[in-house]
Image (cartoon, rainbow, N blue to C red):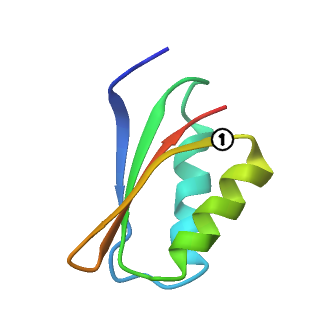
Amino acid sequence: MSQTIVQQLDVQGLACPMPIAKAAIAIRSMQPGDRLEVLATDPGSVPDFTAWCAKTGNDLLEQTEDAGVFRFLILKG
């Protein structure tokens, strides 16, 4: 299992549902155990990523916020 971030996705400025849609596309090309980092500015992305990870079997390892930028670290299940 990779401990490093395999792919970074910057979806700052995009509103729902685009952050999730772009993350779903990105994670399809990744291997189980890979990590995806997503940067978003939509406050709605916080509950969206929590629900999406639970529904898709991916693990939300970290969720942080700094100056209005939300960072999600997702482990592909």
Relative to residue 28, is residue 33 depicted above or below?
above
Q: Is residue 10 left or right of residue 49?
A: left
Residue at position x 59%, y 34% in the image:
76
Residue at position x 34%, y 83% in the image:
13
Question: Which of the 4 image quadrants contains residue 21?
Answer: bottom right
**Residue 28: percent from left, percent from top:** 62, 41
The total number of labels drawn is 1
Give the camera-side residue of 67 and 77: 67
Q: Which residue is mark 1?
A: 58
Q: Secondary structure at mark 1?
A: loop
Q: Is residue 42 left or right of residue 39?
A: right
Q: Amino acid at mark 1?
A: Asn
Q: Is residue 48 left or right of residue 46?
A: right
Relative to residue 67, is residue 25 depicted above or below?
above
Give the camera-side residue of 6 and 51: 51
**Residue 23: percent from left, percent from top:** 54, 56
Question: Which of the 4 image quadrants contains residue 18?
Answer: bottom right
* Furthest residue toward right: 55
* Furthest residue toward top: 1
Residue at position x 46%, y 82% in the image:
43
* Furthest residue toward left: 67
Task: Report the quarter where the C terminus lies.
Answer: top right
> Label 1: how many residues lie within 10 Å, few (<14), some (14-19) or many (20+)?
some
**Residue 19: percent from left, percent from top:** 51, 70
Relative to residue 11, is residue 60 depicted above or below?
above
Residue at position x 45%, y 34% in the image:
35
